[in-house]
Amino acid sequence: MDALVSQLFAGLSLGSVLLLAALGLALTFGQMGVINMAHGEFMMAGAYTAFVVQGVIADAGVSLLVSLVIGFLVGGLLGLLLEVALISRMYKRPLDTLLVTFGVALVLQQAARDVFGAPNVDVRAPSWLSGAVEILGVGIPKTRLFILALAVLAVVALSLALRYTPLGRRIRATVQNRDLAETSGISTRATDRLTFFLGSGVAGVAGVALTLLGSIGPTLGTNYIVDAFLVVVVGGIGQLKGAVIAAIGLGLLQAGIEYSTTASIAKVLVFVIIVAFLQVRPQGLVSVRTRSLA
Amino acid sequence: MSTEQHDTPSVDAVPVDGTTGLDTEALEAVIAAPGERFRHDYLEMRDLRVVFDGFVAVDGIDLTVTQGDLRFLIGPNGAGKTTVVDAITGLAPATGSARFGGVELVGRPSHRTARAGVGRTFQTASVFDELTVLQNLDIAAGAGRRPWTMLRRRSVVPEHVEQALDTVGLGHVRDLPAGVLAHGQKQWLEIGMLLVQDARLLLLDEPVAGMSQSEREQTGRLLQRIGEQRTVIVVEHDMEFLRAFASSVTVLHQGSVLSEGSVAQVQADPKVVEVYLGRDAGARASASAATGGAPPSPGSSSTPSSPSPSSAEVS
Amino acid sequence: MSARLGPRARVWGGFLLAAALLLGVAPAVLSDFRLNLLGKFLCLAMVAVGIGLAWGRGGMLTLGQGVFFGLGGYLMAMHLKLADAGPGGVPDFMLLYGDGTVPGWWEPFRSPVVTILAILLLPAGLAALLGLAVFKRRVRGAYFAILSQALAAAFAILLIGQQKVTGGTNGLNGFRGFFGYDLSDPVNKRMLYYIAAVVLLLMVAAVRLLMRSRYGELLVAVRDQENRVRFLGYDPALVKVVAYTVAAAFAAIGGALFTPIVGIISPADVGVVPSIAFLVGVAIGGRATLLGPVLGAIGVSWAETSLSESFPSFWTYFQGALFIVVVAFLPNGLATLGQVWRRRRGGSGAGIAADDAVRPDARRSDDQESGVHDPAVSGRTA
């Protein structure tokens, strides 16, 4: 029983991290079709933001909350810059954006290495997040619970924003029919930028959250980017719902297989399962079917 | 690049949008196959239904088209015309039945449907832009080739590919990339591809969109000739073209068959006048229907959304 | 000048020239060290030739070629380690990390014949299987790219995790012999270079034949209009699988030769980042051309070696900038510049007539095509 609960929670926890990493991608890749390989580096930038902020604000609790805000802005602004400078020229070549943003990722990683040094650095967790909470007889680290809560919060906030704000409506309109949106007076350019800002901002937040789990380094993003993309692929595009289910599902799966084998075998098995899953549902879990010709 | 593929010297610099027309004599050579091959061909749809996420695009259509017919499929936007074609060719998920030549097409993978003798074109002329006209036709002719043939260069141009080139009047641009062809020429290339593909059922989605008047007439006559032998379904918005060339018409409305019959019968059908031609055109159309196929009124000749080359390029 | 020769003569001339450069000039003027380095570049170029076929011609952005490269390299390394092993027949690293016994699935690779067959067939077979699974279900564009990348990630993690049988992060290294030839003898190192050069020349010839065949035309058709091809009665999945499998086989052979030439194969050569890095040379040289990928790969590897020796951090910036500038602004690679140059020259000399007259148009559609043909966006709705 204890083992089951603790595995379940390990899976949920991994899933929530994946979700935070993938949520921004669900916007930029899922809604806009842009494959941003630098998304992981935006997370890395968020993590280093937390490191810098902590250098200024000594209190770990205050600095964490401030970092979440600033991390969002840092990630968002980097994304905005990327969109304006490069991606806006390449909407007709989605696969090429992948390579271009990979180049950006390389540059950002090296920049982090040059500025902060290659060795990993640590960000102190606030005292109110140290220790564990007993749930069903199993000790769960408070940091993990915090990240879970943060992921839930981010999903709720994003879906509310997409559904009820004018900006959200514009984003959805642009995604569903770009030409029609444009002729209806929506500036698709501005919408693209905002979407990218939002998605990249969430990456920054995810990066701040990751500082709670361990030390951070220039390659922090590369560790998450592949899994984050898989979440979006499995989840299907167009709706956040798919990403949520896929992230939690993959988290549970990975943790479950890891429990009975090893982490590296689990990775391979999860990949095989994903390919098998795509045999059944090539469009992912949640897909919007249209009659448009491929 | 693929343009230097052939040792045949590229034919004199004829302007790409040259006005050479279709060659019906060459057509006879392409479709010279014995008529018995097609004698018992017919397309039969029974309760064909397509649902997209709860939206019923095609709502239980029954439709039979026999060999030798040139059937036009018309209807307002969203009536399900293209979706019917998609369902037959495996592009849209369908239930019910669509049989051609004794073969059930619903649920069959697209490439196997094609091998069963069903060919189609798309609203937007979709040819292989980077390949030459000749290469386009050669690919269309080659689905049955063995692997070993595929892995070698083309040493001679197959006879029926040559004839198809002449039929669709593209012999002088055979070595040009298809991407530089004029819009009408691309449509002809597509028809040529259907011919060399040896399709016995041809499904054409707006084949004359964006064509000039004389191109339309040539295309119409070409389709009529093909239709004498094979089963042809044309999805069209152009009423003038329809009146000139259709041998029978099926009107779709909201995913169902609204009316069916000869051009005159359909035009006289009050239901058609009401839903299809719309309120404003209704008066004029009923007037023309009464006289049985009067000259087309400008209002009806370019019905709901007349497709234009510019809209075709978006996709 | 070369334009006066027939196309066939030009091709043969170019091929012989390349052969003379690789087999005659290079060994004569380069030191043993430099020649060995060039051999390494040639192995990487083999991967690039395959990527040029799969990505440039077939539109499959494969971000996981490191997997096949690694499979070939590790299969070769396993055999070399077993052949090197001392009296007990157990490779040194297994004595170090493991329990000193050789796992059963290593045993067949004591045989040179089994090893070579495995290198030729296993990665290709895996690619065929994976390709069928993925392409049959019409997973393509971005989805395919991401899956291939995930495969590379999983493979590298597996190699690192199973240290007892794979050598872990260190990989497999310290080979002393190559099928009975002593690798410390410079003559045998030269022999390896010659093998790599001949293999690469054969691969380029094979890809040229493929590109010019009917299959080559069909592959381009599938890249640009997959659905249209389907309605002509072909199964596009099979067309793609062939190119993907050939690319995988080439990568595996490149990996298998890379191992003895460089003397080590490790997860750092096969993971996500090296797998994408294979693409930069292809992109620079011109993804859809025959020689672009080869020249690009050799050029980039050469630049990396010489730059990263003196300015290690600068190289990473440079590599990143290459990706950005080339892919964003020169989608057809440096081959575009070559075409522009050729067009100019053709324009000034009025002799070259009809053929060139149509080219500018053709090229214009090329430029658009190279952007639009990747059906990533459409892949989402299909």
Image (tube, rainbow, N blue to C red):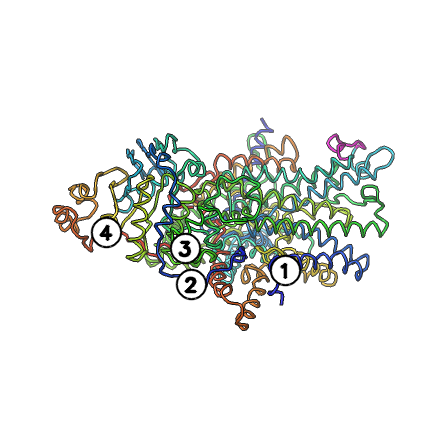
Q: Is residue C135 above or below residue B294?
A: above
Residue C341 at x, y = what percent?
Answer: 57, 68
Residue B52 at x, y = what percent?
Answer: 36, 39
Is C102 contained in the magenta span? yes
Reading the image, the residue beneath label 2 is B14
The magenta-colored residue range is C99-109
Residue depicted at 78% across the width and 48% down the height = C263
- Looking at the image, is mark 4 or mark 3 nearer the viewer? 3
Contact flag, marks 3 and 1 (Cβ < 8 Å): no
Reading the image, the residue beneath label 3 is B170
Q: Is residue C112 left or right of residue B41?
A: right
Q: Which mark is residue C10?
A: 1
Residue A146 visible in image = no
Q: Chain of mark 2?
A: B
- N-term-proximal mark, 4 vs 3: 3
Point out the residue furthest to the top here.
A1
Reading the image, the residue beneath label 4 is B240
Same-chain status of marks 4 and 3 = yes
Contact flag, marks 4 and 3 (Cβ < 8 Å): no
**Quadrant where the C terminus of chain C is found in the figure:** top left
**Quadrant where the N terminus of chain C is found in the figure:** bottom right
